[in-house]
Amino acid sequence: MQQQVVPMIHVPDVGATIDWYSCLGFRLRDQGKEGGGEIVWAALTCGNGEVMLSAGGTARTARRREIDLYIFVEDVDTLCQSLKGRVEFVEDLHDTFYGMREFIIRDLNRFWITFGQPMRK
């Protein structure tokens, strides 16, 4: 039996969150609506990964939220440059002590998204 962990993030507005993540290249795999047509659940894919969104989250102003997403990419430098001026940066592009080159942004719900690539030796 194959096992896979898929994070579920509770957000105030699932539809707006789908739109925001779609601008980063995520694809909508599935969604669920309530009787009034409001989107209350969605599954988004990014490469081999998946994340689910569920209605009911609350807006917060804390520096960090309860969950962060970490996305491995092949060209972190180019991606970072393409997002400048379009999203809120938490940390600009930098090399880490654990061998990754990465940067951190916030999504519209204030969750952190780190994009990373192993440093070349």
Image (cartoon, helix red, strand yellow):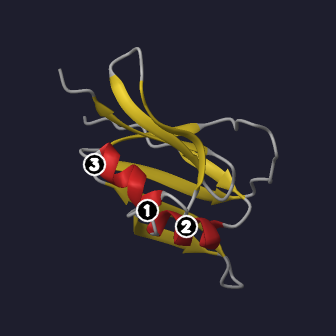
Q: Residue at x 74, y 61 (%)?
A: 12
Dividing the picture into quarters, in which one does residue 68 lie? top right
Task: Inspect the image, locate mark 1, and give the three-letter code of the amino acid beneath it.
Answer: Leu
User: Which quadrant of the figure contains the N terminus?
Assistant: top left
Task: Inspect the image, locate mark 3, and give the three-letter code of the amino acid beneath it.
Answer: Asn
Whether residues under marks 2 and 3 lie with C-beta atoms below 8 angstroms apart, the answer is no
Disc with the residue nearer the chain's start (1 vs 3): 1
Q: Which residue is drawn at 35% across and 26% down?
A: 100
**Res 48 label:** 3
- Could you tell me how far apart the alpha carbons at marks 2 and 3 are, in whole angstroms? 19 Å
Q: Which residue was labeled with disc 1?
A: 24
Q: Which residue is drawn at 44% across and 31% down?
A: 94
**Res 20 label:** 2
The foreground one among 11 and 119 is 119
Whether residues under marks 2 and 1 lie with C-beta atoms below 8 angstroms apart, the answer is yes
Label 2 secondary element? helix
